[in-house]
Image (cartoon, coloured by chain):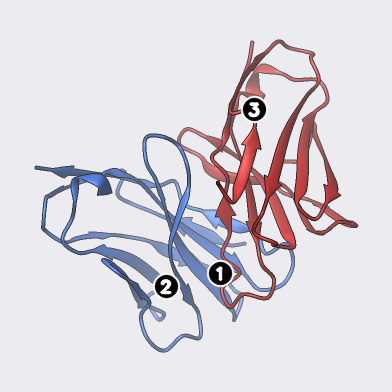
Chain colours: A red, B blue
C-alpha cells in the first residue's frame, strides 16, 4: 500500500462548486503540505501544517482552505472553484526529526474546473 | 527570496551513458537543503537525493549523485548508466532554514533516454 494516498485521483467540476481533496499518510510523519503544479511553473505551496493544531498559509493560499483532521489526514478545499484552479494537486509529508526533512509526495489529484 | 533555476528545458542521452542535469540556486540562508525529484509521465513525484548545505561530501544514491559546488551555488544531478526508465521530468528544489520548511522548485528538465 502507498504511504501517501490522495483521493480522488481525478476530478472534473464546474465553476462555483465546492470540492474537497483528501490526503492520508501511513508514514507517521508530523508535517503535511499541499502543493499545486501548473505547466511551466513547477510546484507551488498552498498550505502546510506542522502538527494537528498548526496550519499555515503558503504562497498561493487564496481561494483554498485546509483541515488537519488528524496527524495522518490533511484535506484541501476549494470553496468556490474557478477555472484557473485547474491543476495537478500534490499532498506531501515530512518528518521533522529526519536529517534532510525530505518531503514525500502522494500520487497527485488532477483537477479540472470547467 | 529563494530561487531555483534549471536552464535545460530538455535533455537527451543515450542509454547506458551518464548525464548531468543543471541546477543553480539563490538564497541568503546560511543553512539550506537541496533536493532532486523525478516525475515520470504517470505524474507522481519521486524523491531521489538530498544534499545539506553543510555536508562536506557530495550525496550519492545508487546511480544518482549530486555535484554540489557551494561557492558557485550549483547542485547538479548526475545520473550514471542511464536507463530507458529514467525518461522523466526532473525537478531541483531547495528548502531554507526556519519558517515553512517549504520546498521551492525549479521549472524542471525533461530527460529523454534514447535506446
- In the picture, the quarter occupied by the N terminus of chain B is bottom right
Across and down, in percent, residue B78 comes to 26, 65
Q: CA distance from mark 1 to mark 2?
A: 9 Å
Q: Chain of mark 1?
A: B
The residue lying furthest to the right in this view is A53
The one nearer the camera, A26 or A91, is A26
Please give the chain letter of the residue carrying mark 3: A
Secondary element at image label 1:
loop
Which residue is at 37% across, 41% downward?
A: B40
Q: Is residue A48 above or below residue B74?
A: above
Question: Mark 2, chain letter?
Answer: B
Residue B27's disc is: 1
Q: Tell me the mark number nearer the camera, choosing from 1 and 3.
A: 3
Q: Which residue is mark 2?
A: B73
User: CB under 8 Å between callouts 2 and 3?
Assistant: no
- Alpha carbon distance from label 1 to label 3: 36 Å
For marks 1 and 2 on the same chain, the one whose residue lies earlier in the sequence: 1
How far apart marks 2 and 3 lie (CA) works out to 39 Å
Mark on residue A8? 3
Q: Position of residue B85 (x, y in %)?
A: 25, 46
Density class for disc 1 (Cα within 10 Å; few <14, some 14-19, many ≥20) is: some
Q: Is residue A55 left or right of residue A4?
A: right
Marks 1/2 in contact by CB < 8 Å: the verdict is yes
Give the number of the mark in front: 2 or 3.
3
Q: Residue furthest bottom?
A: B56
Q: Is residue A18 left or right of residue A96?
A: right
Q: Quadrant of residue A114?
A: top right
Tally the numbered discs.
3
Q: Position of residue A7 (x, y in %)?
A: 66, 32
Residue B10 appears in the rendering: no
> In the displayed structure, does residue A105 sit left or right of residue B17?
right
Q: Are marks 2 and 3 on the same chain?
A: no
Amino acid at each position: 500500500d502507498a504511504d501517501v494516498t490522495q483521493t480522488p485521483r481525478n476530478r472534473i467540476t464546474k465553476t462555483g462548486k465546492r470540492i474537497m481533496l483528501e490526503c492520508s499518510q501511513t508514514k507517521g510523519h508530523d508535517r503535511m503540505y499541499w502543493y499545486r503544479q501548473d505547466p511551466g511553473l513547477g510546484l507551488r505551496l498552498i498550505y502546510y501544517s506542522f502538527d494537528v493544531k498548526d496550519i499555515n498559509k503558503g504562497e498561493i493560499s487564496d481561494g483554498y482552505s485546509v483541515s488537519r483532521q488528524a496527524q495522518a489526514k490533511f484535506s484541501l478545499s476549494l470553496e468556490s472553484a474557478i477555472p484557473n484552479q485547474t491543476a495537478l494537486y500534490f499532498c506531501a509529508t515530512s518528518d521533522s526529526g529526519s536529517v534532510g526533512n525530505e518531503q514525500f509526495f502522494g500520487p497527485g489529484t488532477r483537477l479540472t474546473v470547467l | 527570496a529563494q530561487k531555483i533555476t534549471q536552464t535545460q528545458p530538455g535533455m537527451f542521452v543515450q542509454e547506458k551513458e551518464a548525464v548531468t542535469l543543471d541546477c543553480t540556486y539563490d538564497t541568503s540562508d546560511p543553512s539550506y537543503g537541496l533536493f532532486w525529484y523525478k516525475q515520470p509521465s504517470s505524474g507522481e513525484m519521486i524523491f531521489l537525493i538530498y544534499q545539506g548545505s553543510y555536508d562536506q561530501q557530495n550525496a550519492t544514491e545508487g546511480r544518482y549523485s549530486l555535484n554540489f559546488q557551494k561557492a558557485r551555488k550549483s547542485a547538479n544531478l548526475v545520473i550514471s548508466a542511464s536507463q530507458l526508465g529514467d525518461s522523466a521530468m526532473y525537478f531541483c528544489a531547495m528548502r531554507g532554514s526556519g519558517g515553512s520548511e517549504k520546498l521551492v522548485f525549479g521549472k524542471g528538465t525533461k530527460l529523454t533516454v534514447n535506446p
